Image: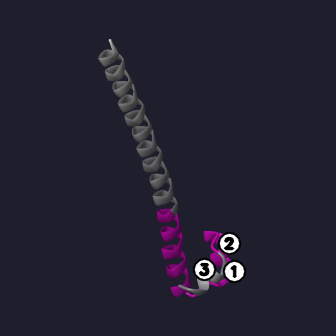
Amino acid sequence: MAYDAALKQARDLYATTETAWNDGMAEGIAEGRVEGIANGILVGKKETAKKMKEKGLSDELIMEVTGLSAEQIATL
């Protein structure tokens, strides 16, 4: 009887740990996707701003169109 109780306890602990690990992994993957998408959008805006700057457009217009700050445009 004691063996069965210990076995059940070990299996419960394993299942709980596995569920928590899987939940943590899913959350981490979701956060990584959100960060990746946000970073991709920023890269796209910077590329657009760089092309606009090369065409001689004003920084004010570039800021208005892309939503980038003056500091971000200055580093292009």
Q: Could you give the CA–CA distance between mark 2 and mark 3, rounded to whole angstroms? A: 13 Å
Query: Looking at the image, which residue is at 50% across and 58% down?
Result: 35
Q: Could you give the CA–CA distance between mark 1 and mark 3, rounded to whole angstroms? A: 12 Å
Q: Is residue 66 above or below residue 74?
A: above
Q: Position of residue 4 (x, y in %)?
A: 31, 16
Q: Is residue 51 above or below residue 65?
A: below
**21, 13: nearer the viewer:** 13
- CB under 8 Å between discs 1 and 2: yes
User: Tag count in the figure?
Assistant: 3
Local packing at callout 3 (Cα closer than 10 Å; few below 14, some 14-19, many 20+) is few
Q: Could you give the CA–CA distance between mark 1 and mark 2, rounded to whole angstroms? A: 6 Å
Give the residue number, with chain letter if any, for mark 3.
72
Q: Amino acid at mark 2?
A: Glu
Q: Earlier in the sequence, mark 2 or mark 3?
A: 2
Give the residue number, with chain letter if any, for mark 2.
64
Image quadrant containing the N terminus = top left
Q: Position of residue 52 (x, y in %)?
A: 54, 80
**Quarter residue 16 falls in:** top left
Q: Amino acid at mark 1?
A: Glu
* Left or right of 70 in this view: 44: left
Give the residue number, with chain letter if any, for mark 1.
60
Q: Assign a secondary structure to mark 3.
A: helix
Q: Assign a secondary structure to mark 2.
A: helix
In this picture, which residue range is highlighted in magenta?
Answer: 39-68
55 magenta-colored: yes
Local packing at callout 2 (Cα closer than 10 Å; few below 14, some 14-19, many 20+) is few
Query: Looking at the image, which residue is at 36% across and 17% down?
Result: 5
72 magenta-colored: no
* Main SS, magenta residues: helix
* Left or right of 50 in this view: 11: left
Q: Earlier in the sequence, mark 1 or mark 3?
A: 1
